[in-house]
Structure formats: C-alpha cells, structure tokens
Amino acid sequence: MNRKLRVGVVGVGGISSEHHLPHWKSSPHVELVALCDIDSDRLQKQAAKHGLKETYTDWHELIERVDLDLIDIATPNEMHAPIAMAALDLSKHVLCEKPMATSAVDAKRMLDLAEQRGRKLQINHHFRFDRTFRDLVAFSSPADLGVPYFAHARWHRRRRVPTAPTFLQSSLSGGGPMLDLGVHVIDLAMMLMGFPKPVSVSASSGTHLARRSDLGGDWGDWDPLAFEVEDFAVALFRFQTGATLFVETSWLGFHDKPEEWFVRVLGTKGGLHWPEGLVVQESNKIPRTTHLTGSATRSPYEQSVHGFVEAIIHDQKVPIPPGESLEVVRMVEAAYISARVGREVPIDDVD
Ligand SMILES: NC(=O)c1ccc[n+]([C@@H]2O[C@H](COP(=O)([O-])OP(=O)(O)OC[C@H]3O[C@@H](n4cnc5c(N)ncnc54)[C@H](O)[C@@H]3O)[C@@H](O)[C@H]2O)c1
C-alpha cells in the first residue's frame, strides 16, 4: 500500500483516548480521519485534542465512509460484534478491544467475515506485548517448559470497581470481572500453554458484595442497584491434553492487596511466573530460578496498534491471531454457563 491507512475510531472513552488515539496519531503509516461516540461532549473534546473535524454520533455513518480502510472499536463489549461485523462486511480492517465478543457465535462470525472479505482482524489483548511476558514466551518451548500440565491465573481487585455503565450494565458489558479481567489472564495462560484445546469447565460466579451500600470503591461510588453483573468468578478448565487451568477474578473482595494479577504455568521441565518474570527449573538435582527483567520496549498498546498496521501494510499475519481470541471467548462463555447451571459443562466447538 503506497498511501496512508485511513482510520476511523468508534468509542472515544477511557481506553481509546488514553491508549488508542495517541498511537494512531504516532504511526507514520496512518491518517486518523474521523471519530464516533454517542457522548457528544466527549467526542468533541477528543476531536479538538487531535485536530479532527469529522465526527459522528452514529457508528453506521462512520463505517459506511468509503474512504476509510480501518475501523477501531473501543465501545462497551456488547457493541464489539455488531460494529465489527458491519465494518468487516464493508471490507474494512478491524482492530477491536477485548473481549472479541460476548458470545463465541458472534466471535466466530467476525472471524469468518474477516476471512471471507480478506481483511485483517485483531483483538487488543495488549498484555501479550508486556516486556516480561514476551521474554517468558521464549521459555514456553518444550525444551524449557516441557509439557504444561497446570496453570493458575488470577486477577483480583480489593475495591476497584469500574463504575461506568459500560461495565456494570449487563446489556452493555455482557459480564463482570471474568469477562473484563479474565480474558486477559486466560489469553496469557493459554499462550504460555500453547493453546491446548479446552474440553470442559466448572465455574462459580456471584455478586457477593457489590449490591451493598456500605462498601466504597477506589475509583468512586457505583449505584448498587444498577450493578447487574458478577463481582467474583472462578473457573477450572480441563484441556484435551489432560492439563488444567484455574482462573480467579474479582472487582471487589476482602483481599489483602488493592490489586493482584498473575499467571503461573507448571510444566514437566519448568515453571513460568508472570508478571514476576521467573523461570523455575532444575538440572542434575540443582534447583535454578532465572529472573527475566524484560528488555526496555515501547508501550504494549502502541505495539498492538502499530503491529496491526504493519501486518496490513506488509500483508502479513496479525500479531494477535483472532482465532485465539475466539478460543478465549469460548472458554469464558462456557464458564458463565457452568456457573449458571452449577456443574461442569463441555466446551463445544462453534461452527
Ligand atoms: N485492553 C485493555 O486492557 C482494556 C482496558 C480498558 C477497557 N478495555 C475495553 O475497551 C472497551 C471500552 O472500555 P472503556 O474503559 O474505554 O469504557 P468507556 O465507558 O470509558 O468508553 C466507552 C465509550 O464508548 C462510547 N459508546 C457507547 N456506545 C456507543 C455506540 N453505540 N457508538 C459509539 N460509541 C459508543 C461511550 O460513550 C464511551 O465514550 C471495553 O470493551 C473494555 O473491555 C480494554
């Protein structure tokens, strides 16, 4: 492609204004053309900040512009699939925030449409570009990790509840911390484990604290009566390989730390710990722990955005394969089903 990619962004809230718009602007291969948001004050503020004149409050009008090559979606979760499918159908490339969708069927439709239209699709699982994580991936090989047989992924928050309806209203978010935070750590654990095929899950979720009016949040108060999703969820996934993955998530809970997240993988030759960057091994009866500090690098968000642009320009595979993001959605959806019915459920393929 000899000209710049022309980009339109749908949703200019927290993540978009902090971590998308600056990286579109900093890419030498991109012209940021137009913004869309249903909140016109926010829209005009971001348009002014980035010197843009073209703004929309209806995403249909934005994506129908024939001069746009790429649509960036940073709206509430439930809007990801409808906007992505419409944009892909119009042969736009799509960068979409996580989670890919709130159902595996929708995520599969997005994947299929991208293939049919020959367009690139990437979901912004930006933690994959965390510098320590990238170094750990190099140790996830059979030579260093061996056969992975267990992983433990956690993202707990003591009192950090996202207060916006984007997250708390189920018709916008599609789920609570298992969908919001779980998709990140599941994605990282799956990557270190080599994306084994999930076969079943037993999960539990509940709104144990968030509807109480005597509890506050580090990020402000929320309306307890409008809190429609879970505040806590755990899941044990089984894989075809015999391996298991235990995932814990919460936005609110009596934890000892304000926030804690990690992914730990046990294999037959070693153990991997993120974000600590530890590789735990033993040879000739001598235990060894290597501490990876991660090499200095650009922001993970910047790498996700710029990596996607490079993949389009050079017609290469996108850095975060959307088929893997679909697998994560499939797992989370099955976990919610298991929690609802109160027993282990199979994780079926989506056709
Ligand atoms: N990669 C990450 O680590 C990360 C971090 C935060 C949020 N996110 C994801 O980004 C998305 C947005 O989160 P946020 O924190 O920016 O939320 P936010 O509420 O700050 O922003 C969402 C924006 O979308 C706008 N919007 C809602 N419906 C719309 C519609 N129909 N058309 C156009 N605009 C619409 C809202 O007005 C708002 O400005 C969510 O899917 C969230 O999961 C990802």
Image: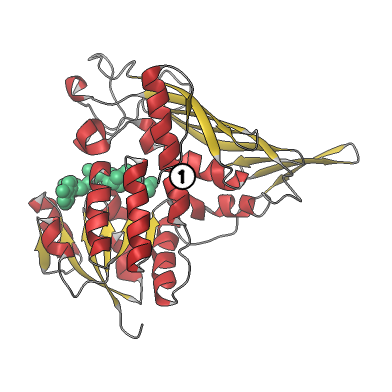
Q: Amino acid at mark 1?
A: Glu
| Position of 148 relative to 115 (above/below) | above
| Position of 338 relative to 269 (above/below) | above
Residue 250 visible in this rendered orientation of the protein = no
Would residue 219 appear left or right of 146 to someone viewing this image? left
**Measured from the top left, where is residue 214 in percent x and y?**
25, 13
Q: Which quadrant is home to the N terminus?
A: bottom left
**Measured from the top left, where is residue 157 in percent x and y?**
41, 29
Residue at point 53% right, 34% down?
Answer: 199
Residue 266 visible in this rendered orientation of the protein = yes
Residue at point 58% right, 54% down?
Answer: 134
Residue 72's quadrant in the figure? bottom left
Way the structure is coloured:
secondary structure
Provide the secondary structure element on which disc 1 rests.
helix
**Measured from the top left, where is residue 170 in percent x and y?**
23, 31
Number of on-image labels: 1
Depth order, front residue of 74/219: 74
Q: Which residue is mark 1?
A: 327
- Check the image and name the residue furthest to the right: 284
| Position of 210 relative to 3 (above/below) | above
Would residue 189 appear left or right of 164 to someone viewing this image? right
Neighbour class for label 1 at 10 Å: few (<14), some, many (≥20)? many
Depth order, front residue of 184/299: 184
Would residue 187 appear left or right of 96 to someone viewing this image? right
Would residue 204 appear left or right of 30 to someone viewing this image? right
Residue at point 33% right, 51% down?
Answer: 109
Does label 1 point to a residue whose CB lies under 8 Å from ligand 1? no
**Measured from the top left, where is residue 261 in percent x and y?**
50, 35
Residue 6's quadrant in the figure? bottom left
